[in-house]
């Protein structure tokens, strides 16, 4: 999608600190980190939000969780623990209209979220 921030990050039109990439997903460091590790993982396909997920396009979500688990092991926080978050819609705190998951680690994460 031409006017989508995360599509532009995936294509390289907007620079980002890449952490991981394969044919289906792209992962990069959040510009405003909320924890020592704060990585955004997105499908390369433009999906506006979790509201748009269906049986036809949702397989990428399972892949994103597998990528998160792989990064947790490689980056060394699998043992300590981590969190993956999706914000959906305005009340859910979503500010960028391209499905994405926040991978957070490196400190004790509070619950419930704000
Ligand atoms: P949301 O609030 O939609 O769940 O998450 C959007 C996230 O994208 C925020 O954590 C925000 O800091 C991050 N973000 C927004 N613009 C940019 C950008 O241009 N580059 C990077 N790396 N992260 C961004
Ligand atoms: Zn997009």
Image (cartoon, rainbow, N blue to C red):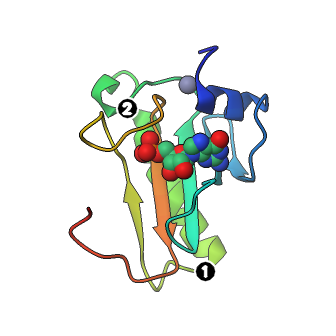
Picture coordinates of residue 46 (x, y %)? 52, 23
Residue name at image x 27 percent, y 43 percent? 92
Residue 74 placed where, x, y %?
Answer: 65, 72
Residue 64 seen from this side: no
Q: Mark 1 or mark 2, which has the lower sequence index?
A: 2
Q: Quadrant of the N terminus?
A: top right
Which residue was labeled with disc 2? 58
The quarter of the picture where residue 72 lies is bottom right
Where residue 81 appears, x then y in whole percent?
42, 79
**Residue 110, located in which quarter of the rendered image?**
bottom left
The C terminus, quarter of image: bottom left
Find disc 1 in the rendering and name its residue: 76
- Secondary structure, mark 2, is loop
Relative to 61, say whether 104 is above or below. below
Residue 53 horizontal side relative to residue 27, left or right:
left
Residue 85 is at least partly visible in this image: yes
**Where does residue 59 sit, x and y in percent of width and height?**
41, 35
Residue 12 position by quadrant: top right
Mark 1 CB near ligand 1 (8 Å cut) = no
């Amino acid at each position: 999608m031409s006017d989508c921030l995360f599509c532009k990050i995936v294509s390289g039109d907007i620079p980002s600190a890449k952490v991981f990439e394969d044919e289906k997903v792209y992962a990069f460091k959040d510009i405003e980190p909320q924890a020592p590790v704060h990585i955004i993982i997105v499908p390369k396909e433009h999906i506006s939000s979790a509201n748009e997920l269906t049986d036809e396009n949702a397989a990428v979500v399972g892949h994103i969780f597998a990528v998160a688990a792989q990064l947790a092991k490689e980056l060394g926080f699998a043992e300590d623990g981590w969190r993956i978050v999706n914000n959906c819609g305005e009340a859910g705190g979503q500010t960028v209209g391209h499905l994405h998951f926040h991978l957070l680690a490196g400190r004790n994460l509070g619950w419930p979220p704000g």
